[in-house]
Image: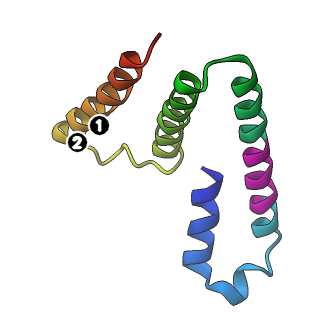
Amino acid sequence: VQAKVLAELLALSGEERVFRSWFTYLTIVLWASTVAVWLKRLNDALAKFNPLFIIPLLQVSFIFFAIVSGGIFFREFEGFGPGQWAGFWCGVAVMFGGLTLLTP
């Protein structure tokens, strides 16, 4: 979500003016801290579990929660019709279904 906020800031404000606002720097710090937490969790998981399973598990979890949180925060789900909801949930099912095929 922080990466999308930063991308929206850059797209809406233009490169010259966006770096004059404190909010841009706050967004960069929050994004960097999120990346640091993600890398720490990835490193801890790789030390404890089989990489052939844990890397896809972490990626599926990250993608799913990024989509859901972005859809809620940016209100992207409000305009979904029945076909879009069906496609969304089919995509989620395929993603988690593929993960279950990797389970040891």
Give the structural element (helix, strand or loop) at label 1: helix
Which residues, given as a range, are shown in magenta?
27-36
Q: Amino acid at mark 1?
A: Phe
User: Residue 7's spot in the image, x, y percent?
Assistant: 58, 67
User: Residue 40's spot in the image, x, y percent?
Assistant: 79, 36
Mark 2 neighbour density, 10 Å: few (under 14) some (14–19) many (20 or more):
few
User: Residue 84's spot in the image, x, y percent?
Assistant: 22, 42
Question: What whole-number distance in Å separates the C-alpha atoms at marks 1 and 2?
Answer: 6 Å
Give the labeled residue for mark 1.
88
Q: Colour scheme in the image?
A: rainbow
Circles 1 and 2 in contact, beta carbons < 8 Å: yes
Residue at horizontal 39 percent and vertical 16 percent from the top: 100
Residue 101 found in image quarter: top left
Kindly identify which numbered label has been placed on residue 84. 2
Query: Can you name the residue that lies furthest to the bottom here?
Result: 16
Residue 15 found in image quarter: bottom right
